[in-house]
Image: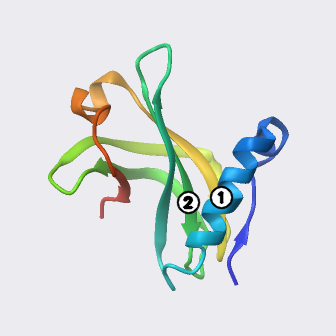
């Protein structure tokens, strides 16, 4: 059975409102897939450096540890890819059958300006 966990720094810094939002998304999406990885959107924003921040709930439905080492992710709409980047994140290791929130940061060179206006964008592993 899928469990929700928070990385230690998230657990300390997360507001009650954000925690409630993530828990609601988890309860809605925790049984959507029986294997593999699924990214459930939480929010999209820009920071002060004009980096695109994609916050998702990462569901590891697999039976093995999920790590991000030279992992190519794409943020796309139905029509096209609007952001893509290879991520190596030593702090992000998600055990089997665990869901964990995370924010993936795309620099200005990694996304198209229309990423800001896209509706229903989805983050995906690009295999």
- Local SS, label 1: strand
The tag on residue 90 is none
User: How many labels sit on residues?
Assistant: 2
Vertical placement of 108 versus 1: above or below? above
Q: How is the image coloured?
A: rainbow
Q: Is residue 65 left or right of residue 88?
A: right
Give the image location of residue 126, x and y in percent.
30, 59
Q: Is residue 92 left or right of residue 112?
A: right
Q: Nearer the viewer, residue 45 or 109?
A: 45
- The residue indicated by pointer 1 is 100
Vertical placement of 42 versus 104: above or below? below
**Residue drawn at (31%, 45%), measured in percent from left and top?**
119
Which residue occupies the extreme top position in the image?
48
Please tell me which of labels 1 and 2 falls first in the chain: 2
Residue 106: quadrant of the picture: top left
- Within 10 Å of disc 2 (Cα), the crowding (few <14, some 14-19, many 20+) is many
**Residue drawn at (78%, 39%), measured in percent from left and top?**
9
**Residue drawn at (51%, 86%), measured in percent from left and top?**
34
- Within 10 Å of disc 1 (Cα), the crowding (few <14, some 14-19, many 20+) is many
- Local SS, label 2: strand
- The residue indicated by pointer 2 is 58
Give the image location of residue 61, x and y in percent.
56, 77
Label 1 and label 2: CA atoms lie apart by 5 Å
Q: Is residue 90 left or right of residue 3?
A: left
């Amino acid at each position: 059975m899928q469990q929700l966990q928070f990385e230690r720094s998230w657990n300390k810094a997360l507001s009650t409102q954000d925690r409630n939002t993530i828990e609601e998304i988890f309860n809605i999406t925790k049984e959507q897939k029986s294997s593999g990885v699924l990214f459930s959107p939480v929010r999209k924003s820009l920071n002060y450096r004009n980096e695109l921040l994609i916050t998702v709930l990462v569901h590891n439905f697999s039976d093995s540890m999920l790590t991000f080492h030279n992992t190519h992710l794409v943020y796309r709409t139905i029509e096209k890819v609007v952001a893509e980047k290879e991520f190596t994140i030593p702090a992000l290791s998600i055990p089997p059958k665990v869901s964990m929130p995370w924010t993936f940061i795309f620099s200005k060179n990694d996304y198209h300006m229309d990423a800001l206006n896209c509706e229903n964008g989805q983050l995906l592993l690009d295999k």
